[in-house]
Amino acid sequence: MKTPTILAALAAALFLPGAAQTADSQASFAYTPGPAGGATLTLNGNTVLTATQRGWITATGVNNGGGVDGNYLVGRCGSSDNCVGDDILRRNYFSFDLAGVGTINSAALGLVQPEDAFGFPTFDGYISVTPTLGYALYDYTGASPVQTATGTGVYGDLGDGNSFGSVVLDASTIGTTVQISFNAAGLAALNAANGSFAFGGATDALAAPGGGVPEPASWAMMIVGLGGTGGMLRRRRTTRLQFLQA
């Protein structure tokens, strides 16, 4: 098969349905179900509330149902590494009962970043192909309660609007409880809440599927470039042979 034919066949294969690449994880707070993965809200430095609901919603609108012991994975659990996931992005959510807490002057959300979850050394809460992940809290304005809400609109709501605080995550957070302090907007929302209060969380700096592996369009450009390079090499070899035969 001639080189142009090979390149054309390879380019076509890259765009065939089902040729999508597997993705690497860009996730945090993975493997957090059960009491050991508790999510808490510390108010005024001394009042500690436990989440009444915690969970995640995928970019396709699926809700894991939350619950008091729900897993609150955020980001993408990839299919090409230890997370062994479905490559679908997730945003997490939390609900707290603020009835009777009074004025809130400070607040911090505590989330467990497990290490050696379930007794497996490679099952850690932070799994990422990038050194750091930004994680931010956002207001939730959608249907209540959030643990029964579904749909892509709910997923979007959990990652936009007013930001209540943020933190930079990295591998050093594994085995710790990450504290995300509420900013002024978050404190205002907490003080305005009446009873149950829900909010969401989302990561940024999410890598493209494949953890840096070129997308099909990039592959196509590379193939064209390789074809051009091959052509140049063939012409150079022909010229050299002609020179030697002269």
Image (spheres, rainbow, N blue to C red):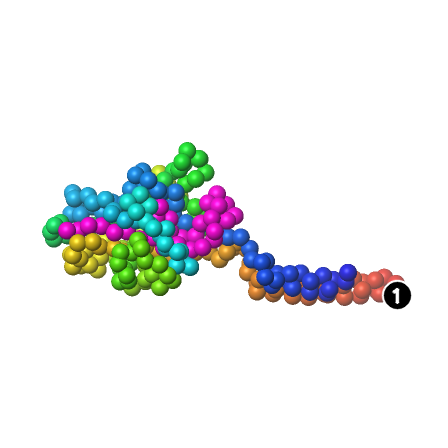
Residue 89 relative to residue 220: left or right? left
Q: Is residue 159 visible?
A: no
Q: Can you name the residue that lies furthest to the front here? A: 148
Question: What is the quadrant of the N terminus in the image?
Answer: bottom right
Residue 2 position, x and y percent, is 77, 62
Residue 61 position, x and y percent, is 39, 59
| Image quadrant assignment for residue 220 | bottom right
Residue 151 relative to residue 103: left or right? right
Q: Is residue 19 visible?
A: yes
Residue 208 relative to residue 225: left or right? left
Q: Which of 10 and 245 is in front in this view?
A: 10
Q: How crowded is mark 1: few (under 14 residues within 10 Å), some or many (20 or more)?
A: few
Point 39% across, 42% down: residue: 31
Question: What is the quadrant of the C terminus in the image?
Answer: bottom right
Say whether residue 126 is magenta. Answer: no
Measured along the vertical axis of the image, is residue 57 above or below residue 82? Answer: below
Q: Nearer the viewer, residue 174 or 191?
A: 191
| Image quadrant assignment for residue 142 | bottom left
Measured along the vertical axis of the image, is residue 221 above or below residue 137? Answer: below
Q: Which residues make up the magenta segment?
A: 71-99
Q: Could you tell me the amino acid type at mark 1? A: Ala
Measured along the vertical axis of the image, is residue 49 above or below residue 13? Answer: above
Find disc 1 in the rendering and name its residue: 246
Residue 224 position, x and y percent, is 65, 66
Point 34% across, 51% down: residue: 65
Q: Nearer the viewer, residue 102 or 153?
A: 153
Residue 180 position, x and y percent, is 27, 49
Point 50% across, 52% down: residue: 23
